[in-house]
Image (cartoon, rainbow, N blue to C red):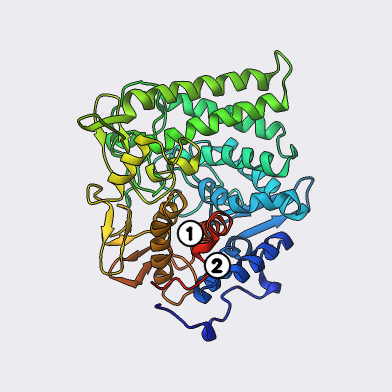
Amino acid sequence: MNGPTAASLPTRRPPPSRRCFQSEAVESALADGARRIGDPVLAWLFTNTFPNTLDTTVTFDESGEHPDTFVVTGDIPAMWLRDSTAQVWPFLPFTATDEKLRRMVEGLIRRQASCVQLDPYANAFYREPVFGEWRNDQTEMKPGVHERKWELDSPLYFLRLCRGYRHHAGAFAPFDATWVAALHSILDCLRDQQKDDHRYRFVRSAAKAPPHAGRGNPSRYCGLVRSAYRPSDDACMFPFLIPSNAMAVVELRATAGLCEELHPQPGDDLLRMAGEFRTLAEEIEKGIRAFGLVETGPGAIEFAYEVDGFGGRLLMDDANTPNLLSLPYLGYCKSQDPVYLRTRARVLSAANPYFVKGALGAGLGSPHVSRKHVWPMGLMMQAITSTEDAEITACLRLLVKAHTATGFMHEAFHVDDASNFTRPWFAWANTLFGELILKVLAERPHLVEGPLDP
């Protein structure tokens, strides 16, 4: 196996006194997982990566009336709604027994609710109400907003965090007036983005922006919701990003249920809003079925990546979640769904222009970096959604190669030379790797009980 030997594996974690946040429940799960993993390098990677979000990215403050949590993405000093939710997602099961961890997640929900209320179109925020490096973007910038790239999945990740917290922690603490106001902002934003004459515009001189003066390519109203950018940070070619719309169906329905659980009285505002969430979810679902499913051969129906409602479609997939590969992970369909399986076969093949193959192996890439780079998050999602031992093992072997003695996962690595990688500190990738390992330990422990070498 490439990489260090068992005798030269010093921890890459900061010492306890320098860790941003510590959870006894997570530490216990970490020690138990490492003990059960037979491959020393894999165990070492797990212990470095899984707690990386807690060790290095969390600012937790309980000095005010309510807890407040700010989670940076890693090497960029800002908080993305998507990343911060994904970074804490695998810790949610531990909130049932760890009170401090539960308060930390409560603080993140409160912080995200305030961010959404500040600007539901923004994707990333600062801890303080300041202007940052993108202050000159041609859009409606506000103090506290780091970037205002409209990515449909951003507010959906906020909703995902809320329902995950309710499910695992069993608490209602953060669902207050600010949270309700955030839900109103999200509904208004999504309704606006169903329309071609929407009010969002974004232009940046240093980056590719949506065409037509920052408004994006034309679309036809069909129930789907527009997205200016993909979760990879790249501008959409066609405005309706199908993976994000599929995520919307799941999270809007779940939020409707949460609203009903909170306030079931007839005539209550949340009960009315639950109806609006359900109606919007059904409109999006009909749009996916009418425009997001495309015939790629005689009788072969698959999911498109992007569409416009006029018949335009883009057949590809990107390594960043939400993507087509992640649809079962997001709860939109079953892993054995025939349409998903056909789509999966295509996106994990040369038919997808961003499926990368080279000397080290193969995996999903992204137009965000060189076409010769594989994204570890794509490999992780491939393994998470796989039902085949051999495929999961192959993904694990390539991920172990990808760390190149750093002890961490990265944004992307060159398929012929893993030492050529981007972002040495990318907490989402680290946390997702830990989530994958926990899933394997729970469902297929035999895959990691011994060495990963063939």
- Residue 46, numbered label: 2
Q: Is residue 99 above or below residue 213?
A: below
Q: Amino acid at mark 2?
A: Phe
Give x and y (percent) for residue 66: 76, 45
Q: Residue at the bottom extreme?
A: 7
User: Which quadrant, please, contains the N terminus?
Assistant: bottom left
Label 1 Cα neighbours within 10 Å, binned few <14 / some 14-19 / many ≥20: many
Q: Amino acid at mark 1?
A: Ala
Q: Is residue 52 above or below residue 140?
A: below
Q: Residue at the left extreme?
A: 298
Q: Is residue 255 left or right of residue 342?
A: right
Residue at the image point whose x is 48% and y is 44% from the top: 329
Kindly tell me whether residue 235 is visible in this rendering: no
Label 2 Cα neighbours within 10 Å, binned few <14 / some 14-19 / many ≥20: many
Give x and y (percent) for residue 152: 45, 37
The residue tagged 1 is: 429
